Amino acid sequence: MTDPKPIRVVLADDHAVVRKGIREFLEDDGTIRVVAEASDGEEAVAMVAREQPDVAVFDIQMPRMTGLEAASIVKKDYPNTRILMLTAYEDEPYIIAALKTGASGYLLKTAGSDELVRAVHAVASGETALSPAVAKKLVQRASGIAPVQEETVESLTEREMEVLRLAAKGMGNKQIGSALAISDRTVQGHLANIYSKLHVTTRTEAVLFAVRKKWIALE
């Protein structure tokens, strides 16, 4: 039996010492391989173009081109590469801007090595990864989200609500499937139904909608 292919990562941060530490955190896991590093945004885009990685881990503030600008280009030109922002900035405008560029995750540099590795795995598998402080800010902002017309929202089934509650706890599809004794493929189906009923396109939007409606409460 062959080992699964490692998750290929391009890492971009303008501080060499920071890159070294992040690289060690990631590669110590044994399932992640940093295939290229970049010290500015333009180089980051070039490395993604060259390596076509599974995940691009970008800082926000970098010379020549910001991580947000780089992420926007990568999302447009290399849609198979998932983007994880890893930054010291936890201000709401940065978070919202990053998510609008198409980033799948937003992690603060205060995150521990285990949290960082989990985030890369989550993003690589198509999930969303948010630091708890970031998730809290998004929930606080939820009251400002334009409500969907009540008559257009279908009720969720009991099973769909169970899936949504577990998603709100940050669980990935496999974890949710394990908790509910169903396959991750079935979880995907339930999420697709949830998105359709709530008129949203992402897990984060679905959770925020449910929180605003007081269907669920984040712990």
Image (cartoon, rainbow, N blue to C red):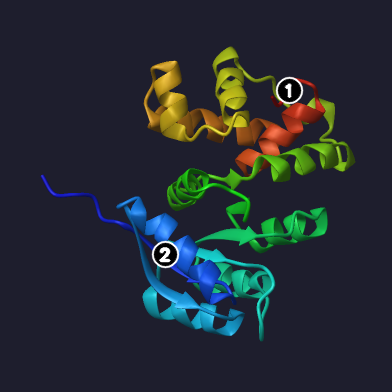
Query: Where is residue 56 shown, x and y percent of the image?
Result: 50, 65
Q: Which residue: 76% across, 28% down?
A: 211
Instruction: Identify the residue under disc 1.
Output: 217
Q: Is residue 137 left or right of residue 64?
A: right
Q: Earlier in the sequence, mark 2 or mark 1?
A: 2
Instruction: From the viewer's side, name the closer residue of 211 and 60.
Output: 60
User: Which three-letter amino acid code belongs to the residue tagged 1?
Assistant: Ala
Is the C terminus in the top left, top right, bottom left or bottom right quadrant? Answer: top right
Instruction: From the viewer's side, name the closer residue of 171 and 205.
Output: 171
Q: Residue 9 carries which label?
A: 2
Instruction: From the viewer's side, name the closer residue of 176 and 161.
Output: 176
User: Which three-letter amino acid code belongs to the residue tagged 2?
Assistant: Val
What is the residue that sits farthest to the front in this orientation?
17
Query: Where is residue 196 shown, x and y percent of the image?
Result: 63, 35
Separation of residues labelled 2 and 1 (CA atoms): 34 Å
Residue 80 in view here: no
Q: Is residue 77 left or right of residue 183?
A: right
User: Is mark 2 in CB contact (under 8 Å) with mark 1?
Assistant: no
